[in-house]
Image (cartoon, helix red, strand yellow):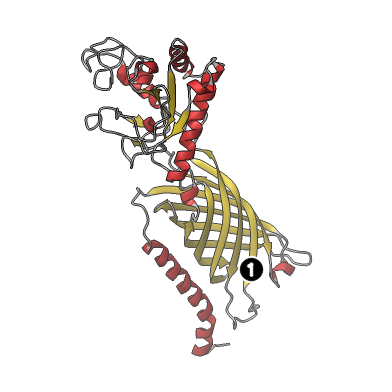
Amino acid sequence: MKTSAAENLKRIRRPALTIATGLALFLAVLSTERPAVAQEFTFHAEPAAAFWMDSPQSDRFTPGFYIALRPGIALGRYVALQWSYAMLVTPAGEGFNDTGLAHFLSTGVRLFPLAELQPEPDPLGGLFMDLNLGYVWTGELDRFGFDAGIGYGFQVASWMSLGPVLRYGQIFQGDNLVNQDPNDAQFLTAGLDFSFGPPYEKEEVVVCPECVPERIEVIKEVQVIKEVQVQAEPDANVCSDLDQDGVCDKIDRCPGQSGPAESWGCPIDPCSGKPLVVLVQFKFDSAELPAETGQKKPMDPVLDAVAAAIAQDSACRVCIMGNTSAEGTDDYNDNLSRERAASVQSYMTEQGLAKSQVPTTGFGSRCSADQNSALPADRKVVFRRLEEGEVCPTECPAP
């Protein structure tokens, strides 16, 4: 039985419109602005249980198995291009003999709408949605089809994420095929998405030490104290150290006096009158004093020395001034800096000082070396001696 040209046109109109719509969406996504990042290859494997949603498939077949393999390229934090091979197998139902088998070859896009909220620019983890369009082979029939999924990946390694995924698929059926039901085949799958990609490496933040003396090379989210100590080690071939305190002169704020690296080479004596900068090195967005394994915290010896110096002079009152790096709003940073100063004050009172001897204030990020900087060295406290009747300052102290 032959079909007319009008019937053929009607048969292909619906899949053609769907493919055109998908391509338009794909081009729109690619045309949006995104960060200029290196393209990374990814690979996704998706085993799942499959269920037919419509008749006659739901009558002829029982629930079955779906597996998809999807190599891809991450084009940015928000979008990846992917290719798919998938196979759908559903056993024959009662009264039927043939197992349902479909092979899918398709191209699609994977979107990460909440990538900005991820702690790292990682193309694997987090919420994702994808759409795939292509060719479906079922027995002797060649047809168009598509599938759309939504899932969430949990990062289990720097190179792998794992999480649940739900998927809807549809195989288009011509309306006038001989001995074939005109209804499209529709199915749902529920399974796991295994995503693989290159291991994520944290970005190094390099600051020019020659531009501003107190700026040093740091690695993001690594304690600056350790970096200062590494650079402070005297080496005749690397730096000079006039006061022989183990802090190179290029970063030593007191090159004629001995002091530890945590105070930029200055003596631990806030009662001397000169503001004392101490790299307490709070973690990002935290007011807790840094801790390490064991009972002793890394800042205890330095803060103990500061408390002892204040205790030796009954007339000495010292303002504890908290600071933050430049991330965040001004109001938020002001509150965080005050909380940091309060944490140090609490430690000082545990050493026997009265709160009246160590009042607190916070400057937020206003006293940063660079207002646009995320330098961890700005997460610090400054101790400044107060004269009789004087209160904590409202302006940044002189260096």
Q: Which picture quadrant has residue 201?
A: top left
- Which residue does the image show at 37% across and 49% down from the upper left? 39
Q: Which residue is mark 1?
A: 186
Q: Position of residue 134 (x, y in %)?
A: 49, 66
- Residue 293 visible to an observer of this rendering: no
Q: Seen in the image, is 177 located left or right of residue 59? A: left
Q: Is residue 143 above or below residue 303?
A: below
Q: Position of residue 322 (x, y in %)?
A: 44, 31
- Which residue does the image show at 42% across and 38% down from the upper left? 364
Q: Which picture quadrant has residue 379?
A: top left
Q: Nearer the viewer, residue 128 or 214?
A: 214
Q: Nearer the viewer, residue 66 or 360?
A: 360
Q: Position of residue 260 (x, y in %)?
A: 36, 15
- Residue 365 visible to an observer of this rendering: yes
Q: How many marks?
A: 1
* Numbered disc 1: secondary structure: strand
- Which residue does the image show at 65% across and 80% down from the upper left? 179
Q: Which picture quadrant has residue 213?
A: top left
Identify the amino acid type marked 1.
Gln
Screen quadrant of the C terminus? top left
Q: Nearer the viewer, residue 347 or 197?
A: 347
Which residue is at the far front? 389
Q: Position of residue 253 (x, y in %)?
A: 28, 21
Which residue is at the far right? 94
Q: Is residue 324 above or below residue 357?
A: below
Screen quadrant of the N terminus? bottom right
Q: Seen in the image, is 302 located left or right of residue 162? A: left
Label 1: few (<14), some (14–19) or many (≥20) C-alpha neighbours in 10 Å: many
